[in-house]
Image: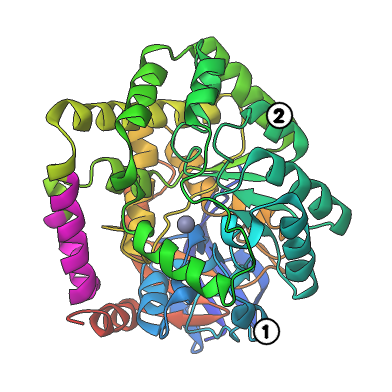
Amino acid sequence: MDRLTNVTVVDPRDGTTTAHQDIHFADGRITKIGTTAGPHPDAIDGQDRFVVPGFVDMHAHPLNLADPAPELGLMLAFGITGFRQMSGTPDLLRHRPDTTDRTPALLATPGPVLTPINAGKPATAVAEVQRQARAGADFIKAALITPDVYYAVQAEADRLGIPVVGHLPAGIDVRAASRAGFRSIEHVGPQLGVLAGCSCHEDHLRAASSGNPIPAPPFKIPFADRIAGKLLQRIVINPSQLTTPATLAAVRETIDTFDEDKARTLARQFADNDTWNCPTLIRIKAQQLCDNPTFAADPNLRYATTKERKAWTRAAESFHQKFTEAQRATFTEQFDLQKRMVKILAEEGAPLLAGTDAVGAAWVIAGASLHDEFDLLAESGLTPLRILQTATTDPARFLNREKTAGTVSAGKEANLVLLDADPTTKAANLHTISAVIRAGTHHNKEALQSLKAQATNR
Ligand SMILES: [Zn+2]
C-alpha cells in the first residue's frame, strides 16, 4: 500500500475534521495529504472513515514478559502503535528490542525502578542513577523511595539531563516535588500522593502517609535488582491489598477534608511547572474496586492467560475478605475523588497522559485497558477531544517527538488508527477501530482479529 484514499482526517490539536482526503506513505512516513483523487490500484479505500494518530499507552510493562509477543499484538490490535515501558532491566537497556511494523514501538524505558533495594540511601541512589544514565535509560522511575533519596536523585538526574518520573515518595510535599522537577506523577500519587496536597489537613496527612513499606537493607545484596523485581511482581497484582487500617483512616480523612480551591491551585501549579499526570484510572479502579463484579464479567478477559485469570480472581477474593464493607466503600469514594481530581487537572490545564499499567496488574488487559482508560476519563468528565489528546498529541509533546508524531501530517511517522465513527463527538467512538497502520503497514480488520485470536485461550 502506498496510499489511503477517501478518509476524514482528524486533527487532535483542535478537533477539526477534513473529509475526502488521501494520505500518501513511503518508508514508514506520511509523505503527502491532499484532496481525494479517486481510486488507485495501490490504495486502500478508507470509505469516509476517520483517521487519528496511533494511540500511545504511556504506562505499560509488556517487556517484563519473557515472551511479550501476544501482548504486543493485542496492543496493536487495540490501536496502540507506541508505548512507554515503565520498568526496565540492565538486559532491556542492553538489548532494546528492534520494534517492527507488527508491534507497537518502544518509545522510552527506564532501568530498574528505584526501590529501597537499589536506592535505599541518597549515595546508593545517586550511583544507581549514574549507572542507568550510562546504560542508556530514557528516564529514571521512582517507585518506593523516601523524600531525601528523591531530592538526591532529582539533583543528579538534572545534572545528567535525564527526567525523573513515577510514584511520588510517601509523605512528600507534592508542590515541592513539582517545583523540584518531578516530570510525571503516575496513578495520581499513588495512594494519597496528589490528593493529600488538596486537603486542609495536608500536614497531618503527610505525616500519616510517610514511611516506606520496604526498609533499606543494611548491606548490599547480590542480585538485588532481581530480588526487588520478584518482590514487586508479587505486590503488583494489587498493592491496595497491603493498605493498613491507619492508611485507610488517612484516606477517609483526605476525602472528608478535600478542598476544591486547593486542588485547583495545585493543578495550575502542575501546569506552570510542566508536571505531568498519568492517572492510569483503570489501574486505580482495578486495585481499589478489585472485587467489582464487572471485572470478572469483562469479555476482554479472554485475552488474559489462564494463570492471570486465576491470580486476578484470587486477588479479588482476598480483597473482599480483607476489607469490611465500610472500608471498601472508602476505597470507592477515593476513586470518585481521584476521578474528580483528574477533571480538575484537565480544567486547569495541567498536562495529562493516557496510561494503563497493563501486564502484571490485576484486571488490566494489554491493549483493551487503554479503551477502559478512555471510558474512565470520559466518566471523569473530560471531553472526547481532550481524551484523544492524552493518547496522541500529549505523549508526543511529553516525549519530545512532536516533529515525528502526535498528528496526521506530512513528514510524520505513518502510525494511524482508522475509526468507523467521529472520535471528537463521543469518546466511545475511539473503540470503533477498523484498521491500524503501523510504520506504513496496513493491518485490516481481519489482521487485527487474528492478533486477538493469537492472544486468546492461553
Ligand atoms: Zn506501572
Name the chief secondary structure element in magenta: helix
Q: Residue at x 48, y 80 (%)?
A: 103
Q: Is residue 246 above or below residue 456?
A: above
Residue at (35, 54) in percent of width and height: 371
Is residue 302 highlighted in magenta?
A: yes
What label does residue 435 carry, if any?
none
Is residue 137 positioned above or below 356 on the image? below
Task: Look at 32% across and 51% down and name the residue there.
Answer: 372
Q: CA distance from mark 2 to mark 1?
A: 34 Å
Query: Which residue corresponds to mark 1?
Result: 94
Left or right position of 424 against 29: left
The residue lying furthest to the front in this view is 218
Give, as a three-letter code, the residue at label 1: Arg
The answer to whether residue 421 of the structure is visible from this angle is: no
- Extent of the magenta region: 296-319
Q: Secondary structure at mark 1?
A: helix
The reply to whether the residue tagged 2 has its Cβ within 8 angstroms of ligand 1 is: no
